[in-house]
Amino acid sequence: MIATLLFVAFLGMMFLGVPIGAALGLAGATAIAVANAETPWFGLLAVPQNFYAGLGKYPLLAIPMFVLVGSIFDRSGVALRLVNFAVSIVGRGPGMLPLVAIAVAMFLGGISGSGPATAAAVGGVMIAAMARAGYPAAYSASVVAGAAATDILIPPSVAFIVYSVLVPGASVPALFAAGMFPGILAGIALIVPAVWLARRHKMGGAEADMPRPPFWRSLREAAWGLAAPVVILGGMRAGWFTPTEAAVVAVFYGLFVGMCIHRTIRVRDLFTILREAGELSAVILVVVSLAGIFAFSLSTLGVIDPITRTIVQSGLSEQGVLGVLIVMLLIAGMFLDGISIFLIFVPLLMPIMQHYQWDVVWFGVVLTLTVAIGQFTPPMAVNLMVSSKIAGVRMEQTTRWVVWLVLAMTLAMLLVVVFPQIALWLPQRLGY
């Protein structure tokens, strides 16, 4: 009964438009109060304790810093210089600008690790350039949204940090290493349909006539941006700083490049940058802390074990259970944001992982891939919302294009499921 109340209260509040964090916290608190009906106020003492416990974890310190990095690099002019450098390499021609958009978004994933931030940074440069070259706005928005989704796979990644907090045994360095090759695979999977669609529908007719930036000048101008992932990831690998400290290093590096090298950030811009990063970080961390109440109610009120037994004893094979979970997560990704999916489903899925002895790092990568697909799958597609707004189109106009990109990234995810070493080879090689 209490388990039913917990989920009915949560889903009911969601349908009424209550914010996801408040719905998680209120549903969990209600279930705790009902379970301790004789002494409800005594039982509710667990609510503030678990609110703080959900937030008081050292790796979560990296989240506001990486969000701030995304805001800084959005204004630093790095994206424009990386685009010019990429164009100088691949040249001009049908399908080349979509390829550049995906490649630059993947590279920026090695700096900020936030899909919406990258969609804003790359979209601000590429959507206008693709419009001048003759690409439809809806197609451009779809490509940018899909490209930005690779950012939560390529380290550093906010999603991996949240997953490491929820799952014992999944370290941040191991997850960062495991996400590298699947992230690159997802990017390549997006490039194929993006270029094919552009050439099949004869888009970008004016692109061949646009000037090609000189290689050496573009390389010189993009050098500071190209060095950023080397500083961040190389410093972590060399042991100079932890992933949390790397986020702070990235903030100061971005400010140095934006204020001293490119001079695109002024002192009066800092307040706006800090305010935007603070608001977004607060939303993420409040949801994380309120989800701690929900997770506590799941674990202490005997909700997880019956669900686990039902799934394990359903008669499905191990592969069948995994397939059902992936489909369920893909559907959830169409309606919920990535952080909420991690906070709701990971506590439920951990006993299933333990029963089948799935590698927690590999499963984290698979889960993150499903979340990445959801970031540009309508109706709840945060990356697509950002890029559609920049392109000035309605989200439903992108459907005919985005469906090909969704299928391509789903294929990449299935390859990681069938061949786990795509994710696990690098962390094992590095000794994580």
Image (cartoon, rainbow, N blue to C red):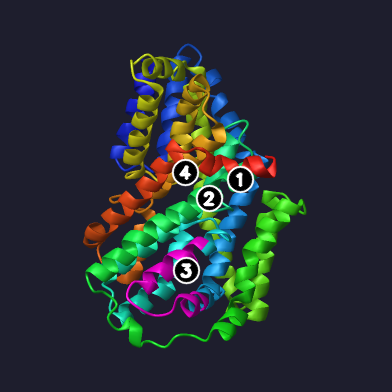
Give the residue pinned by disc 3: 121
Q: Which residues are magenta?
A: 85-106
Give the residue pinned by disc 4: 368
Q: Amino acid at mark 1?
A: Leu
Q: Earlier in the sequence, mark 1 or mark 4?
A: 4
Q: Earlier in the sequence, mark 2 or mark 4?
A: 2
Q: Which mark is residue 181?
A: 2
Q: Amino acid at mark 4?
A: Thr
Name the magenta segment's main secondary structure: helix
Q: Nearer the viewer, mark 1 or mark 3?
A: 1
Can residue 374 be seen? no
Q: Residue at x 22, y 62 (%)?
A: 397
Q: Amino acid at mark 3?
A: Ala
Q: Residue at x 55, y 19 (%)?
A: 42
Q: Are marks 2 and 1 in contact (CB under 8 Å)?
A: yes
Decide: few, some or many residues near mark 4? Use Cα within 10 Å; few <14, some 14-19, many ≥20. Answer: many
